[in-house]
Image: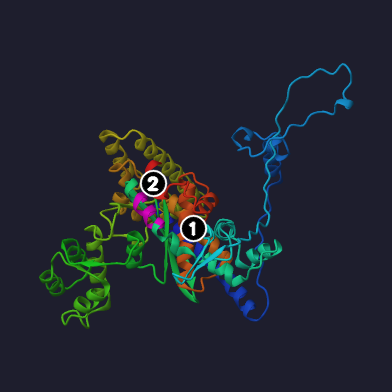
Amino acid sequence: MLVGAIKTLLNKVDAQENKITELSSENQKLKDEINRLKGEKGKPDIAKNKDDKKDSDDKKKGGKNGGRGKNKNAKEIEIHNTEEKDVEKKDLPKDAQYKGTRDVVIQDINFNLNNTKFIIHKYYSPFLGKVFEGQLPPEYKGSIFGPGIWSFVIQFHYEARMTQNLLFKILTGLKVKISVGEISNMILCHERFEEERQNVREAGISRSDFSQIDDTGARLNGKNGYSIAVCNQFFTDYYTSLSKNREAVLRALAGTELKFAINEIALKYVDDKVNNKAIVGELRKLQSNRLYGPDEFTNEILNAPWARGKITSWIKHIKEGCAIGAFRDNFLGVRSKILICDDAPQFKGILEFLGLCLIHEERHYKKLTPSHPDFIKAVADFRETFWKYYEKLKLYKINPNDKKKKELSDEFDLIFLGKTCYFALNQLMEKTRAKKDELLLVLEFPTIPLHNNTSELAMREKVIQRKIRGYFRSLEGAMASDIFLGLMSTCRKIGISFGEYLKDRFYNRHELPPLGDLIWMA
């Protein structure tokens, strides 16, 4: 009994220390904000000193890589020009003997203004009353700027993350007569790529067993919004809007405007979410094969007498359920049956199977900051066990079998028993145990990933863009960002240069097949 009391007391002391640390940090942030509002500066965030010995060791490990040397990738470099350099014969001694050659590959880039004047010949037919004139090449029609400038602006804005002002400085420095507004129009030329984006989505989703999803904040014309990334190993697509609720997630997964169906899938969802049998009964009367558009559904269902004036959350769940019903019934295009994501609630209940990220789950344990040595050891031991178990799951993916599946399931139960001396650790284990089926979905589907890193990496592009740009002035700007960043990421995944892809499309070469076809060939 005394041991239990001491254990409880130590846990309370540890919890109080964590609370004090948390409050101290919050207090400092409030002080900094007060100073900022007064026109002063807060406490600077200065990084810790680096370990000099470690830095020295790192430099030693770098060895020859730090300086200039032979280009190890010279054999893989495409050669555009070849020049031979011989020794001046007058400089050679009489006994000099020829010993062959050696190759030196120099990489360079030629970036110059290349204006073209087209002299268009014209003819007039008095009989027809019609003028005939020579035609510009297709790639030069519709703009006073050539495809080289268009592809340059798109690539450097999205891939090199250059702002419009920087692009303006570079182009005007090259003596291009262009305005910031014209650069903005180029950046927003996303409509001509919409069809390819849809083909990429369809091919990418069809090619894989699963989809992955994540979201991050975004600013839309002064309002808080969200960007959602949908991806897998073959493609990436983004959807930016003012919300990140289940409807927005559905829109991102579908890649099209939502439609609604009152079917068994919808009725089951509404029955689980809405504590009102009468509403479910009214919906059941309307069950059919009909597909509703957004306006039809609002007018005929959500504004029906039996639904009018009901609790807002109920109406929301009816809308979600009927959208999920249409989605799962394949009315909204191709889809996956498995969704890999973090533990955010808006991702749940949409597809048949949900797989949670094990790396996300471990981060909860990494955030524990115990102060007592026994608690520190308990967390360290658990995390070591967790990662060993993770390695076993990776091996299972390579060679799945029923026996190993049963062993790994039983081992999960033992690992997360929650019987350590550290109460905070035990509470986390209890929460993890409740998510066993989602965390161990890989035992049923060995081809799916154990983590959600793919969508996190996709989301990083949006985060960096937000830090640079701050916000989108319009929904059109957000849509352009969604399309071009998605195509850029897809190009990388299938081994295509985004710059070469843009040039191919803007110059109308079409030497590169549609990206959707390349996904099928990958």
Residue in view at x 45 percent, y 66 percent: 479
In this rendered view, identify the residue nearer to me: 404 or 145: 145
Residue contact between numbered discs 2 and 1, judged by CB atoms under 8 Å: no
Residue in view at x 32 percent, y 46 percent: 209
User: Residue 254 at what x, y percent from top left?
Assistant: 32, 60
Single out the residue that lies furthest toward the left: 285
In the image, taking residue 493 as reference, residue 441 lies left or right, namely left
The quadrant in which residue 412 appears is: top left
In this rendered view, identify the residue nearer to me: 42 or 195: 195
**Could you tell me the amino acid type at mark 1?**
Leu
Q: Which residue is mark 2?
A: 517
Q: Which mark is residue 174?
A: none
Question: Total number of numbered labels?
Answer: 2
Q: Which mark is residue 485?
A: 1
In this rendered view, identify the residue nearer to me: 165 or 329: 165
Sequence order check: which comes first, mark 2 or mark 1? 1
Residue in view at x 63 percent, y 37 percent: 79
Single out the residue that lies furthest toward the front: 127
Is 296 situated above or below 438?
below
Give the spatial CA distance, label 2 vs label 1.
19 Å
Residue in view at x 34 percent, y 59 percent: 253
- Quadrant location of the C terminus? top left
User: Residue 388 at what x, y percent from top left?
Assistant: 42, 39
User: Residue 44 at what x, y percent from top left?
Assistant: 67, 66
The magenta segment is 196-204
Residue 198 makes an appearance in the image: yes
Residue 201 is inside the magenta segment: yes
